[in-house]
Image: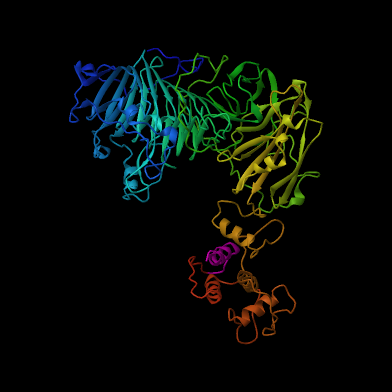
């Protein structure tokens, strides 16, 4: 049955495809021909004996109707009747080997189950050759690998508590994986499937079954193809192509249409999705949410041609990963509300574009070189606000210009990250499952990005959080207002210059600059330029903090319905939300995040309006410390933050905490008194404690409560450095039963004091 497919990628040169999983000789294959009337295996009717290498008649795993919350987590739309499930023919493969599939099952499933011990058996390997096969399943995945060999033995040992020191890496090798799919040349193969919501083991809430995608593997999986003429279409009512551990795509032409994520690999901070070759087009998020490619661990693109689209309404991206995203070769075009930021260690240049407002579907976006030739071009098939593109044609230190619908664009913000956010999991099955109609080439222009072999040196960049060691706000340029960011208000610009007052119209990649935000029409559009003022931001040390927006005003009179407010994290990872200014300040303030981190607020004239253009950006922090020398990620950060917020420890002035500074006995008793909530008490016990000094009352309190002693001759030595051992003794006197967990010895630093004192806050 011939099916329409998603838009094909049109590139100027052929993609070099891997054939590492090439088909074996005919006498090594088992041929399975599907039909609704009967299934044949090597020309004979398939057995119904579960001991056979291939058999039919197994019960399909699905989410039963008539169940309650003790059965699992499925919604009403995810439940199915026994009659619907029983109408499916399950073709089960039980032995290792190569199997060539052809034919059609209008209601069926291909299942591979080599037994519960297969995970540890390197011979438990199955290769499926897709040779013109069409399978539809309305209650579960259309294809599922249950039990085959798991090639990542280090993770298996870790999962069995045999390798507690296991560290996930992005360079996993899945060559030996037990689950392999090969797309035969010149064939079209269709898998239209559903999913199985989480089903509990009886009497528990532990997982018994949960299969989120139409094309699914519980073990690491490889997908390959002879050349670009072999096509795999996957259509899903939830996620499209999933592996619970690793997924490697080496070749073939793959089209995915999904209601939720297009591709997902499931193991948090472990899974690796690797694309080495082939043509991959993903139309994801056609339900409530969904990323194009969502790896719960790493995403590594080494080659091939990748085109991804995410949900238009949720904070999802064309590319999304919990661990770094590496772009080392190939061509990449990713569209979303936001895309996760790529890793600066990527070996191929990439460009991240964060538009000031949402681009309408049908917008023609082109990146042009100095000669006016299109280096990369696409028509947005969905609304989007974030685009990530990469290809070997992109070069560092080369000026490009960006056009939308033939209008020159400008940018006002520049950082190592991008606008960002992450949608949740889930998604519901629609009433019907259909394939998209038509073929439209989304990448155009001579010289468009082509696959690349990934060679070259890794670009390095300075630590994004690096700040002057002794930062003083008075050193800022005269007239600088950190709460009012207009054009050029964020990050460093790497020597790029503005063509006019509309912003920076040259998009030049450098080793440290890959991302451009606040992208909107330049003055070349002829529209009236508008800027915005955000009131309510405050300066805290180096940071700008925005807890409540009290007003947003504009430089010209503009309808609030033509103004979009967007909040994203920087770099792009966990947050993206927007609304119209006409929704009111309550809606705008609801966008402000609560989680600690760095964020970007963008206020802009909506894209596509005929009269106005312009964007204003504000970089702000949540949970920020007012110190330039204590950064998130530092070992003492949490302790310093806790003590600062509790009013126990302060800075030393000039926006500094001085974490390596020594602690005096006077400072130590002050911290102890604040920890206990005690007031000051005068004392004349010591001749070297000046009456009325900032610490004298705290010394008196400490003496009265038996926390400190002098030398027996009337001396306290308030300015003498305290040691870790002495501080531990004082803390134990303050809190009965206190046991120091830090073990600090020698002269105590302020950072160490914070970590010691924070132990009492935790009690």
- Residue 345: image location, x then y, percent: 52, 36
Q: Residue furthest front?
A: 66
Which is more toward the observer, 674 or 228?
674
Residue 282 or residue 246, whichever sits in front: 282
Provide residue 149's location: percent of width, then percent of height. 28, 35
Position of residue 453 in the picture relative to residue 463 (left or right): left
Q: Residue at x 28, y 34 (%)?
A: 148
Quadrant in which the N terminus is drawn:
top left
Q: Which residues are magenta?
A: 746-763
Q: Is residue 491 visible?
A: no
Compared with 568, 437 (above or below) is above
Q: Is residue 324 magenta?
A: no
Percent coordinates x, y for residue 55 in the rendering: 22, 26
- Rendered residue at 39%/31% (across/down): 195
Vertical relation: 740 (above or below) 587? below
To which quarter of the image does residue 124 belong? top left
Q: Position of residue 616 (x, y in %)?
A: 73, 35
Magenta segment main secondary structure = helix
**Is residue 258 in sight in this rendering?**
yes
> Which of the 4 quarters of the picture holds residue 447?
top right
In the rendered image, residue 762 lying in the magenta stretch gets the answer yes
Most distant residue in the bottom direction: 713
Answer left or right for 325 relative to 368. Answer: left
């Amino acid at each position: 049955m011939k099916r329409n497919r998603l838009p094909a990628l049109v590139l100027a040169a052929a993609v070099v495809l891997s054939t590492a999983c090439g088909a074996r000789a005919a006498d090594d294959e088992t041929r399975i021909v599907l039909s609704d009337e009967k299934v044949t295996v090597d020309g004979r009717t398939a057995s119904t004996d579960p001991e056979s290498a291939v058999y039919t008649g197994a019960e399909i795993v699905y989410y039963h109707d008539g169940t309650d919350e003790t059965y699992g987590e499925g919604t009403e739309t995810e439940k199915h009747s026994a009659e619907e499930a029983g109408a499916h023919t399950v073709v089960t493969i039980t032995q290792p080997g190569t199997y060539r599939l052809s034919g059609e099952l209008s209601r069926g499933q291909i299942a591979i189950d080599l037994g519960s011990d297969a995970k540890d058996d390197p011979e438990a390997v199955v290769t499926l050759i897709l040779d013109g096969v069409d399978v539809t399943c309305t209650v579960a995945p259309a294809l599922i690998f249950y039990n085959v060999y798991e090639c990542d033995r280090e993770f298996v040992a870790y999962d069995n508590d045999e390798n507690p020191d296991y560290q996930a890496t992005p360079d996993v090798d899945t060559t030996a994986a037990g689950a392999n799919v090969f797309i035969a040349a010149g064939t079209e193969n269709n898998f239209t499937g559903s999913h199985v919501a989480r089903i509990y083991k009886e009497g528990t809430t532990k997982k018994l079954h949960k299969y989120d995608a139409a094309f699914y593997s519980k073990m690491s999986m490889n997908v390959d193809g002879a050349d670009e003429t072999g096509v795999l279409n996957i259509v899903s009512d939830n996620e499209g192509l999933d592996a619970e551990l690793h997924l490697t795509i080496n070749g073939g032409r793959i089209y995915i249409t999904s209601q939720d994520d297009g591709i997902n690999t499931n193991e948090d901070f472990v899974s690796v999705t690797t694309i080495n070759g082939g043509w991959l087009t993903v139309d994801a998020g056609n339900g409530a949410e969904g990323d194009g490619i969502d790896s719960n661990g790493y995403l590594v693109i080494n080659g091939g041609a990748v085109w991804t689209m995410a949900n238009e309404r949720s904070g999802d991206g064309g590319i999304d990963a919990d661990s770094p995203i590496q772009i080392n070769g190939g061509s990449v075009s990713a569209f979303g509300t936001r895309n996760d930021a790529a890793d600066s260690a990527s070996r191929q240049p990439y460009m991240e574009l964060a538009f000031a407002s949402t681009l309408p579907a049908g917008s023609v976006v082109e990146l042009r070189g100095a000669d006016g030739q299109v280096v990369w071009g696409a028509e947005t098939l969905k609304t989007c606000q974030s685009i990530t593109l990469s290809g070997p044609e992109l070069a560092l230190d080369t000026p490009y210009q960006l056009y939308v619908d033939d209008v020159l664009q400008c940018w006002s913000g520049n950082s190592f990250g991008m606008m960002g956010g992450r949608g949740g999991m889930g998604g519901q099955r629609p009433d019907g499952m259909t394939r998209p109609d038509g073929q439209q080439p989304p990448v155009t222009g001579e010289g468009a990005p082509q696959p690349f072999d990934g060679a070259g040196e890794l670009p390095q960049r300075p630590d994004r959080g690096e700040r002057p060691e002794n930062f003083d706000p008075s050193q800022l340029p005269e007239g600088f207002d950190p709460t009012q960011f207009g054009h050029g208000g964020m990050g460093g610009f790497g020597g790029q210059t503005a063509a006019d007052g509309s912003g920076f119209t040259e998009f030049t990649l450098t080793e440290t600059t890959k991302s451009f935000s606040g992208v909107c029409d330049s003055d070349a559009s002829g529209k009236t330029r508008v800027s915005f003022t955000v009131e309510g931001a405050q300066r805290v040390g180096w940071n700008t903090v925005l807890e409540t927006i009290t007003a947003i005003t504009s430089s010209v009179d503009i309808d609030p319905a033509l103004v979009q407010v967007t909040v994203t994290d920087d770099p792009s990872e966990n947050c993206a939300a927007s609304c119209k200014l006409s929704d009111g300040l309550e809606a705008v303030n609801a966008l402000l995040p609560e989680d600690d981190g760095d964020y970007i607020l963008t206020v802009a004239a909506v894209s596509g309006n005929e009269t106005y253009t312009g964007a204003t950006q504000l970089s702000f922090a949540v949970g920020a410390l007012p110190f330039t020398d204590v950064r998130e990620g530092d070992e003492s950060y949490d302790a310093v933050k806790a003590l600062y917020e509790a009013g126990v420890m302060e800075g030393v002035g000039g926006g500094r905490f001085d974490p390596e500074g020594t602690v005096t006995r006077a400072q130590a008793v002050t911290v102890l008194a604040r920890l206990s909530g005690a007031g000051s008490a005068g004392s004349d016990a010591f001749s070297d404690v000046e009456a009325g000094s900032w610490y004298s009352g705290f010394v008196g309190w400490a003496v009265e409560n038996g926390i400190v002693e002098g030398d027996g001759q009337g001396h306290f030595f308030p300015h003498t450095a305290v040691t870790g051992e002495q501080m531990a003794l004082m803390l134990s006197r303050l809190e009965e039963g206190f046991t120091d967990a830090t073990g600090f010895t020698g002269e105590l630093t302020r950072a160490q004091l914070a970590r010691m004192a924070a132990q009492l806050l935790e009690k």
